Image: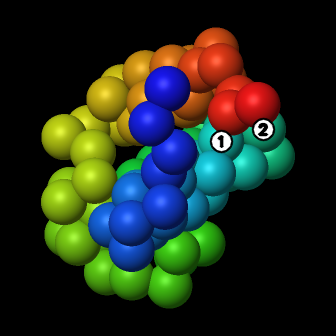
Amino acid sequence: MKERTSKYDQRDLAAVDAAAAVFAEKGYHASGTIDTAQRLNIKQGSLYYYFRSKEAALEAVCLEGIRPSSP
């Protein structure tokens, strides 16, 4: 599996991590994209660069959770 080392990949992973933290703290239904954006210290509209929706953020969190780690 390819390592996620590019600047974009690192920022993308930070967005996934932020979404995961928000979902863990507030629960999926009580959280919003504004919460994830605030955690990343970006504007809410900028979050859509990473995720199309809150549902897409949840999908990315789940997929990252099952992604095999590099040896």
Mark number, residue 1: none
Q: Residue at x 31, y 81 (%)?
A: 43
Label 2 CA crowd tier, 10 Å (few <14, some 14–19, many 20+): few
Q: Which residue is mark 2?
A: 24
Q: Is residue 24 above or below residue 64?
A: below
| Residue toward you, 13 or 47 | 13
Query: Could you tell whether 3 is left or right of 55 in the image?
Result: right
- Tag 2's secondary structure? helix
Q: Position of residue 15 (x, y in %)?
A: 48, 58
Please, is residue 56 above or below residue 67 in the view? below
Relative to 29, 69 lies left or right: right
Q: Amino acid at mark 1?
A: Ala
Please report contact status of discs 1 and 2: CB closer than 8 Å, yes or no: yes
**What amino acid is found at the position of numbered circle 2 in the picture?**
Ala
Foreground residue, 3 or 39? 3
Residue 23's quadrant in the figure? top right
Image coordinates for residue 40, horizontal then vertical, percent = 52, 75
Image position of 1 (left or right of 28): left
Q: Position of residue 35 (x, y in %)?
A: 54, 62
Above or below: residue 18 compared with residue 41: above
- The answer to whether residue 39 shows anywhere in this view is yes
Instruction: Tell me if residue 37 comes above or below residue 33 in the rendering.
Output: below
Q: Which residue is mark 1?
A: 20
How far separated are the C-alphas under marks 1 and 2? 6 Å
